[in-house]
Amino acid sequence: MKSYRLTAFEKPLELSNGAIPEPTGREVLLKVLATGICHSDVHLWEGFYNLGNGKKYPLEKGGVALPLTLGHEITGIVLRTGPEATNVTVGKSYLVFPWIGCGQCAMCAAGDEHLCGGKPLTLGIYRDGGFADHLLVPDARYLLALDGLDPVTTAPYACSGLTAYSALKKAGIIIHSEPIVVIGAGGLGMMSIGLLKAMGGVGAVVVDLDEKKREAALAAGAKAVVDGSASDASNQISRAAGIRPRFVVDFVGSEQSAALAFNAVAKGGKIVIVGLFGGAAPWALPMFPLKAVTIQGSYVGNLAELRELLEMVRLKRIPPIPITRATLDQADAMLGSLRQGNVIGRVVLTP
């Protein structure tokens, strides 16, 4: 089995050649067809989250152990199954739900394994993921049949698609009556443009610092784009939306993007923070009650939401985001390109 593993934080991924695992119990062995590279993989490579004010949260403290095969946006074809695996077909292709919980805590019991309060088993984070030519999935229940969908363009729905979809759902009926604001035109922001249309949304004003990414957002169907570094960016957002927006989703999660979101949102509005770029909160506390703003975090989504999303992709024929295809041997180089901000849309590895 060939894989590219993180053996030390902030060091190049290392090629590993080992035995192909044999599935037991409810496990399923996949031959990997495609794996997306996510910005979360960059944070894992760095080994910490930036908490601002010179503070860092080491991922080892959160249970991440090395060596680790990264990659959590995975499609694959079933090669073998354990004797207790059910509702899965050898030779059939599937999208993998990677946000696997402990199965025992209250959040897992409620169906929100992605918010597991115990010891999660997330693929590519707490156990080996898809930067490999084979993958062992703990249970067949985490496999969603592709049924004709392209494995390369579908792989990113396991994270960027699911994350964008779950965040947009938090807007409620607002998306059907007025434009929303999307900060960040990376993989998540690009994904949200097509999803918003499929969900019956009015449209999105997309904010990004990168001109090429703003152009890509317009090409993907954004209502308007704004340079987030402009001194009057907040006013430009309101003019582009036609109103002061009531819903802003921040796919960057930096001090600068969060400050802009707070300045741009209307009184009584809602900000959903998704991105993990890092920093400390930039808001003055008296402004919370004065603006009556709701600020909510959103972390990927649950298995039921991924099923909803995949069905919507199938029925609404949502156009895929821009995809750069790369070989498994390019995993480290492509991770570096994403880290440097040189990727439009998503890089997907194909072993």
Image (cartoon, rainbow, N blue to C red):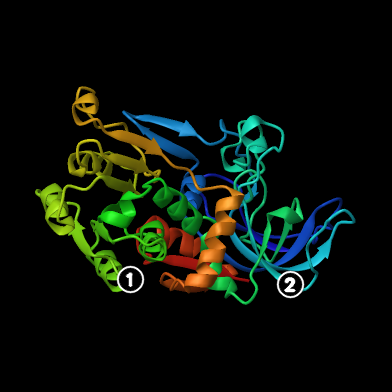
Quick check: 289 left or right of 296?
left
Mark 1: amino acid: Ala
Q: Residue furthest top?
A: 286
Pinpoint residue 307: horizontal percent, then vertical percent. 59, 58
Instruction: Assign a secondary structure to mark 2.
Output: loop
CB under 8 Å between discs 1 and 2:
no
Q: Nearer the viewer, residue 34 or 173?
A: 173
Quick check: 105 left or right of 222?
right
User: In the rendered image, is residue 137 in sight?
Assistant: yes
Quick check: 177 left or right of 102?
left
Residue 175 in which image quadrant: bottom left
Instruction: Assign a secondary structure to mark 1.
Output: helix
Quadrant of the drawing holding the N terminus: bottom right
User: Dot 2 surroundings within 10 Å: few (below 14), some, or many (20 or more)?
Assistant: some
Mark 2: amino acid: Lys
Q: Which residue is mark 2?
A: 92
Quick check: 331 left or right of 201?
right
Instruction: Give the label on residue 220, or none.
Output: 1
**Residue lying at 35% horizontally and 63% vertically, measured from the top left:** 193
User: Dot 1 surroundings within 10 Å: few (below 14), some, or many (20 or more)?
Assistant: some
Pinpoint residue 231: horizontal percent, then vertical percent. 10, 48
User: In the rendered image, is residue 36 in sight?
Assistant: no
Height in image: 78 above or below 188? Answer: below
**Residue lying at 51% horizontally and 68% vertically, measured from the top left:** 313
Residue 50 in which image quadrant: top left
**Residue lying at 40% horizontally and 55% vertically, measured from the top left:** 339
In space, the residues marked 1 and 2 are separated at their CA atoms by 31 Å
**Residue lying at 56% horizontally and 30% vertically, measured from the top left:** 61
Task: Work out whether mark 1 precedes mark 2 in sequence or the reverse, and give the earlier one.
Answer: 2
